C-alpha cells in the first residue's frame, strides 16, 4: 500500500481529494441542509445581494453584466496566475536559483505587481462569485477553462514514459 502511495503520490492525493470533496458535499448538503439555502438558487432575485458591496442583482441586465464580468475575471486571473506564479516560485523566490534571466528591477516589479494586482482583483470579485452558486460556477468555470488551455499547451510539448504497473510491484 505505501509503495503504491510513494510511487504514485500525485494520483493517490488526487483520489483522496475527490473522495473528501464528495464526503464534504454529502455532509454539508444533506446533514446540514446547505443545498436548500438561497446560495443554491440560479438567476436574479430581489433577495440576491453581493457579499461585501451589497449590490442587488434583481434583474437580468445586472445578472448578465455580473456574470460576464466574473467569467472574464476568472479566465484572466487564472491565465495570468498559471503563467507567472510558476516562474515566481521556481525562479525568483527559489533560494537555490542564483541566476534570473531578466533584469533585477523587472523581476521585482513583475513579482510584486502580480501579487498585488491578483489580490486586488480577487477582492473585487470574491463577494460577487461567492454570492450564489451560478455566479460561483461562472467565475471558477472560466478559471478552469483557462487552466485547461494552459495545461494543454504545456503538456503538448512534453514527452511521457509509457509505464505499466505490475500488481506484484505494487504489493
Image (cartoon, rainbow, N blue to C red):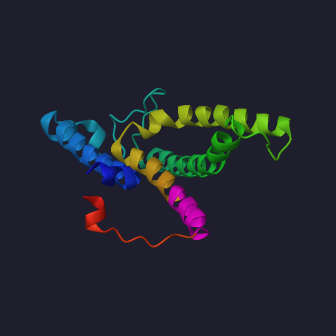
Identify the image quadrant of residue 88: top right
Residue 97, how many percent across, how many down? 72, 41
Reply yes or no: does residue 149 show up in magenta.
Answer: yes
User: Is any part of residue 27 visible from this angle?
Assistant: yes
Question: Residue 21 colored magenta?
Answer: no
Up/down of 23 relative to 156, above or below? above
**Does the magenta stretch mainly form a helix, a strand or a loop?**
helix
Look at the picture and state if 108 lies above or below 18: above
Left or right: 71 as drawn, with respect to 153: left
- Residue 157 horizontal/vertical position (percent): 62, 69
Q: Farthest residue in the left direction?
A: 31
Which stretch appears magenta? 146-158
Q: How far across and down, in percent of the image, does residue 162 sit?
A: 45, 73
Q: Is residue 100 shown left or right of residue 114?
A: right
Image point (26%, 43%), residue name: 20
Q: Nearer the viewer, residue 171 or 29?
A: 171
Is 3 or 41 nearer to us in this picture?
3
Instruction: Compare residues 110 and 135 and report the one nearer the observer.
Output: 110
Left or right for 76, reference 45: right
Residue 126, image x and y in percent?
48, 35
Going 40% across and 52% down the picture, which residue do you hit? Answer: 10
* Quadrant position of the C terminus in the picture: bottom left
Quick one: 164 or 129, which is closer to the camera? 164
Amino acid at each position: 500500500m505505501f509503495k503504491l502511495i510513494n510511487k504514485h503520490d500525485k494520483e493517490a492525493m488526487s483520489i483522496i481529494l475527490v473522495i473528501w470533496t464528495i464526503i464534504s458535499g454529502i455532509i454539508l448538503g444533506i446533514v446540514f441542509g446547505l443545498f436548500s439555502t438561497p446560495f443554491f438558487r440560479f438567476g436574479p432575485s430581489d433577495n440576491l445581494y453581493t457579499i461585501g458591496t451589497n449590490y442587488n442583482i434583481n434583474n437580468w441586465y445586472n445578472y448578465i453584466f455580473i456574470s460576464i464580468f466574473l467569467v472574464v475575471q476568472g479566465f484572466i486571473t487564472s491565465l495570468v496566475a498559471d503563467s507567472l506564479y510558476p516562474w515566481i516560485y521556481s525562479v525568483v523566490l527559489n533560494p537555490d536559483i542564483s541566476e534570473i534571466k531578466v533584469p533585477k528591477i523587472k523581476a521585482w516589479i513583475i513579482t510584486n505587481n502580480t501579487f498585488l494586482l491578483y489580490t486586488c482583483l480577487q477582492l473585487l470579485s470574491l463577494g460577487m462569485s461567492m454570492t450564489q452558486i451560478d455566479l460561483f460556477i461562472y467565475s471558477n468555470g472560466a478559471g478552469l477553462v483557462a487552466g485547461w488551455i494552459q495545461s494543454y499547451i504545456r503538456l503538448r510539448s512534453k514527452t511521457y514514459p509509457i509505464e505499466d504497473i505490475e500488481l506484484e510491484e505494487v504489493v
